[in-house]
Amino acid sequence: MKIDSTQPLEYSTEQNRLNILGFWIFLGAEIMLFATLFTSYFVYENRTGSGPGGADIFEITPVLIETILLLTSSFTIGLAIHAMRIQRTKAMLGFFAITLVLGAAFLGVEIYEFIHYYHVGATLQTSAFTGILLTTLGTHGAHVMFGLFWGIFIFIQIKKQGLTPQTANKSFIFSLYWHFLDVMWIFIFSFIYLKGMM
Amino acid sequence: MRELFPMKQVNGFIFSLLLTVVALSVYFLEMSFQAGLTILTVTAFVQAGVQLIIFMHAGEGEDKKTIYASLYYGIFLALVTVFGSLLAMVWGYL
């Protein structure tokens, strides 16, 4: 395996470069996955039947907390990658851990929110609106949940093996995934919550 | 300590918090639906751009062109799907 030391560690081999490119192409497909969910949401937004509408069930406080948690975690994973590039393994692990804790807190608030929806009678079966709302939020939440476990495993690998071309590459790809989830949340925050409460 | 917080990323974070505050104005201030939606569209897409360029380093590396091509393709299809469906199923067409 040829290691090019003029490049950052995560780009240092041919395989690493291709992994990153491949992951970007995967993110392109993820954009489409969320686009179909948003499409269905916009189409069914007003089909509330006898159930509640968006303005009836959305609460600004948990939504705001979730947004700030995810924005901050996106910032800290960015700092982790920066620390990785200047070979500060300890600082990197610190930022990585903060990111995962913020992600877990996000999920906690989202679970609280789902329980709230259940209590006010907005379930998957209530109406077309609540069905697509919970599907869209749930798909995003499931991505965060997956990212959390993925991140924990990468964290353990770096602790055990240190920063190698492989672990650096995995961390960088994880950071792309995490930023992507933040971008999707911004769209959910803007076009589902804020639009619904306007 | 300082070298762990590059200006570019700190500024990007502050800017993304500012965009969130601007987006929140549609909830806290009185405004028409159209004005609110315009604000949300601008803040959401700028926010996405900040993430892609500052945090995801989309513009670096030799695969830059391919990365942007696949991104633009994804975004193009996403917009066509969303607006095409709205046109056909919600707004009505003649």
Image: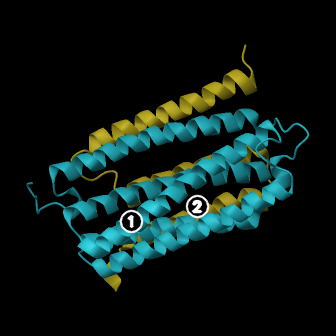
Chain colours: A cyan, B yellow
Quadrant assignment, res B86: top right
For residue B56, say whether it is visible.
Answer: no
Say yes or no: labels 2 and 1 on the same chain. no
Residue placed most toward the observer, A98 or A189: A98
Residue A106 percent location from the top left of the image: 60, 66
Residue A195 percent location from the top left of the image: 73, 49
For residue A181, say whether it is visible.
Answer: yes
For mark 1, does the 10 Å Cα neighbourhood hold few (<14), some (14 to 19), or many (20 or more) residues? Answer: few
> From the image, which quarter does the C terminus of chain B lie in?
top right
Q: As shown in the figure, which amino acid type bears the numbered disc 1?
A: Phe
For mark 2, does the 10 Å Cα neighbourhood hold few (<14), some (14 to 19), or many (20 or more) residues? Answer: some
For this view, does A183 lie left or right of residue B69?
right
State how far apart marks 2 and 1 are (Cα): 33 Å
Residue placed most toward the observer, B19 or A40: A40
Q: Secondary structure at mark 2?
A: helix
* Callout 2: chain: B
Q: Residue at x 42, y 53 (%)?
A: B52
Q: Residue at x 34, y 51 (%)?
A: B58
For this view, does A85 lie left or right of residue B92?
left
In this figure, which residue is indicated by the disc labeled 2?
Answer: B19
In this figure, which residue is indicated by the disc labeled 1?
Answer: A153
Residue B65 percent location from the top left of the image: 28, 40
Q: Residue at x 67, y 66 (%)?
A: A109
* Callout 1: chain: A
Q: As shown in the figure, which amino acid type bears the numbered disc 2?
A: Leu
For this view, does B47 lie left or right of residue A6?
right
> From the image, which quarter does the N terminus of chain B lie in?
bottom left
Question: Tag count in the figure?
Answer: 2
